[in-house]
Amino acid sequence: MKSIYLIFCFISLLGFSQEKTDSGFWATDFEKAITISKKEKRPIVLYFTGSDWCKPCMLLKEDFFENEKLDAYKSSFVFLKIDIPRNADLLTENQKTENYKLLDTYNPGKVFPLVNILNHKGKVLDKASGYSSLRDPKYYFELLENNK
């Protein structure tokens, strides 16, 4: 019986270690994203999310940002996530300050989710907002395809 329990624990740990994390391709610093964009001549995908309260954001994350099809675009863009959570403990004070400045500049209507495509100068080239409960990320993939 102990061996069955140990096997179950081991399999559970494997599952957790393979979980996708946001840290893989997301930048969280606007100035660094601008620098990379300019140096590598890649547009910026500026994503506004309310990670702990916005249901459409959670669905978009799952259907679009965690979709294997997105891998084809990761080398064409700099991805910058701006999280505006309700739980204040999810961000450092510096990150919260920077995120709210970017919210005021690039999302004054406070629309969630919002994806802006920026050039290396910070100019908005294109954008898409909201996410339907039909859960079809096709429009977001078209946004990337049209702005490569």
Image (cartoon, rainbow, N blue to C red):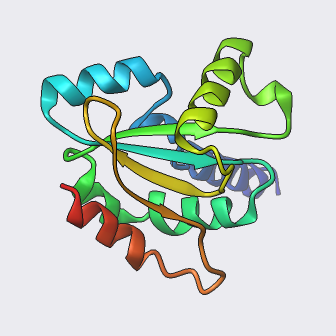
Q: Quadrant of the C terminus?
A: bottom left
When the figure is inspected, residue 96 is found, relative to residue 75, above or below; the finding is: above
When the figure is inspected, residue 35 is found, relative to residue 46, above or below; the finding is: above
Residue 23, position in %: x, y? 49, 34
Taking 59 as reference, is 71 left or right?
left
Q: How many marks?
A: 0
Taking 103 as reference, is 52 left or right?
right
Q: Residue at x 63, y 48 (%)?
A: 49
Say if residue 66 shows up in the picture. Answer: no
Q: Residue at x 71, y 17 (%)?
A: 92
Residue 132, position in %: x, y? 61, 79
Residue 74, position in %: x, y? 27, 48
Which residue extends farthest top?
Answer: 94
Residue nearer the viewer, 58 or 145 = 145
Q: Residue at x 35, y 32 (%)?
A: 122
Q: Quadrant of the N terminus?
A: bottom right
